[in-house]
Amino acid sequence: MARPRPVTFDKKKIVAENRRARFDYFIEDVFEAGIALQGTEVKALRGGEGNIAESYAEVKGNQVFLVNSNIPEYSHGNRENHEPKRPRKLLLHEREIEKMHSAVSRKGMTLVPLMVYFNSQGRAKIELALAKGKQTHDKRETIKDRDWKRDQQRIMRDKG
């Protein structure tokens, strides 16, 4: 019998976070994927370097690739250092890839990376979301809700 999947993923050290994604997109599903990295990329990530702000994932055939993510060259690497903006293969189950492919092709959704982190076993993972883009009025509603919640907290703190 298969072990049940945890509801939240095991995150020991968060390396990079895409905070803008939750503001720009409606998040539908969240997946945890492994990243196929070279040695100097892992060392650069362990040093806390890496950026996924403008990156996205795309499905090519039966594989998923992370495009436009930036992991700068490792400072102590030699001539075998990695290319900073190369497409990186994401490691997922076939069923998950099929689900992503159908959502992206039929429903017009986007694969957005939310964060890169190391799990408790020391493996680099990425949290990937199936998301639908927000329009400007949706973003304004998000800002209103956030401001109202902040005001509520302030009022409760002042009264209590």
Image (cartoon, rainbow, N blue to C red):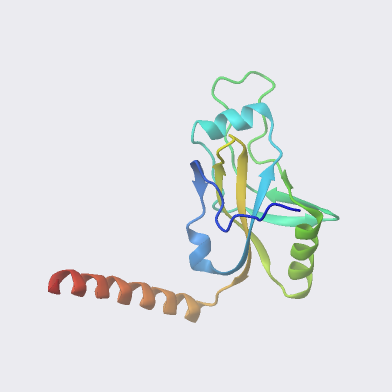
Q: Looking at the image, which is closer to me, 70 or 18? A: 18
- Residue at x 66% of width, y 27% of height: 39
For residue 13, side relative to residue 123 (left or right): left
- Residue 75 at what x, y percent from top left? 54, 24
The percent coordinates of residue 92 (x first, y second) are 74, 50
Q: Is residue 121 above or below residue 156?
A: above
Residue 148 located left or right of residue 22: left
Answer above or below: position of 97 versus 35: below
Residue in the image at 49% along x and 60% along y: 20
In the displayed structure, does residue 19 sit left or right of residue 30? left
Residue at the right extreme, as displayed: 61
Q: In the rendered image of this protein, does residue 127 appear above or below residue 38? A: below
Question: Nearest the camera: 141 or 94?
Answer: 94
Could you say where residue 59 lies in the image, as x and y percent from the top left?
Answer: 78, 57
- Quadrant in which the C terminus appears: bottom left
Looking at the rendering, which quadrant does residue 57 occupy?
Answer: bottom right
Q: Position of residue 154 (x, y in %)?
A: 21, 70
Which sits in the foreground, 117 or 21?
Answer: 117
Rendering quarter of residue 103: bottom right
Q: How many marks?
A: 0
Question: What residue is at 57 percent from the left and 27 percent from the top?
Answer: 74
